Image: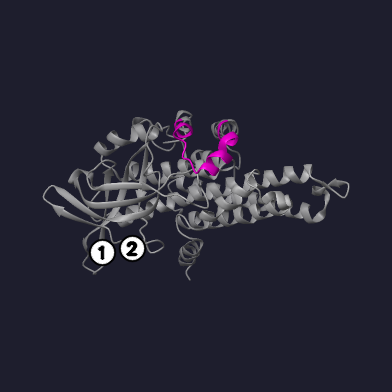
Amino acid sequence: MDFDLTTEQEMIRKEVRKFSEKEILPIAIELDEKEEFSEDLTLKMGDIGLFGMFVSEEYDGQGLDYISYIIAVEEVARIDGSQAATVAAGNSLGIGPIYYFGSERQKQKYLPDLCNGKALWGFGLTEPTAGSDAGGSKTTAVRDGDNWIINGSKIFITNASCDLSLGVTVQAITGTRENGKPEYTCFLVENGTPGFKALPMHQKMMWRASNTSELYFDDVRVPNENVLGNVGDGFHQMLQTLDGGRLSIGAMGLGGAQGAYEIGLKYAKDREQFGQPISKFQAIAFKLADCATEIECARNLLYKACWLRSNKRPFAKEAAMAKLYCSELMGRVANHAVQIHGGYGLMKEYHVERFYRDQKLLDIGEGTSEVQRLVISRYIGC
């Protein structure tokens, strides 16, 4: 077994870390406080190649392996969850479905701007009554000649209602299968299409500087050429997209855990009580030792899942495991980091409280921790 990263992967980590510390860190608290999505910062992330990393060069992607992409998400998340969410959703949920399931016309039309970071694309799955039960969607699409008419709504959709948003992939019910279950199809709907509204959501506890949206479809008419793949393939497309998205959420958990750990470690070395740095007290030192150990375990688990994907081997079970473990790990590490800070850890002027808040969505998005355990239990034969 070879645990060494390639020279290119090490360079990506170095450059993304440098960018994140220089461009994101100085304004992360301000953007969080104002609940402000930064178009300028997103364009800068596009300029350094953080979008379309796993897309082939013919569509203006970089043609890199999945571990390289995950390292990039990890390094952004080490500084700020909001910007990491923009990158992760922009790639795994926005670009991914079009790249893997789209027609050549769809790829040529949308991917270049998405891969250059000049535009963003949303992933419309979750509905007010369909979260963990993704099959509980009520949004419908009815065939009308060479068009489809979409009605319904979506909620908690990332990257769908900012100035850079180009459109969304939408799952809708298009019929009933022979077994009586709904037939699902995915459609590409551009912003500005009559009857389609994308509204930003505010007053979030976490990821306050990312763009989260509610989507409304009122007799939205799209041509048949906007069907993603084949009619009836929507549910399979969405599930496969979520498998890859779980790796992105795992990277956010891993990077967030690393960032919170480093903040806690630095504070413990600087803060003195009873005449010495609090890092010298066993109660604090053991917390940090546990954090360092678990982060190492999480990185190996996540990278193995990415390696499996890059080598075109089954990875769904490992993706669920990595998402579950890395997400919950960040919660444990952020909790320890806040505890190490004491009262200061509760103040917004300290980055650590943002890590504590941002973590919670990782237990929920891309399938809750409960759903991940359900997925894993099925793979192990329970």
Residue at screen point 27% across, 34% down: 109
Asked if marks 1 and 2 touch (Cβ < 8 Å), the reply is yes
Q: Which labelled disc corresponds to residue 28?
A: none
Q: Main secondary structure of the magenta part?
A: helix
Identify the image quadrant of residue 125.
bottom left
- N-terminal of the two: label 1 or label 2? 2
Residue hosting label 1: 182
Residue 371 lies in the magenta stretch: no
Residue 252 lies, in percent from the top left, at 54, 47
Residue 26 lies in the magenta stretch: yes
> Left or right of 150: which side holds 332?
right
State whether residue 228 appears in this view. Answer: no
Q: Assign the N terminus to one quadrant of the image.
A: top right
Residue 345 lies, in percent from the top left, at 68, 50
Residue hosting label 2: 135
Circle 2 SS class: helix
Q: Nearer the viewer, residue 265 or 92?
A: 265
Q: Nearer the viewer, residue 62 or 5?
A: 62
- Magenta segment boundaries in residue numbering: 23-43
> Left or right of 76: which side holds 104?
left
Vertically, is 67 above or below 182? Answer: above
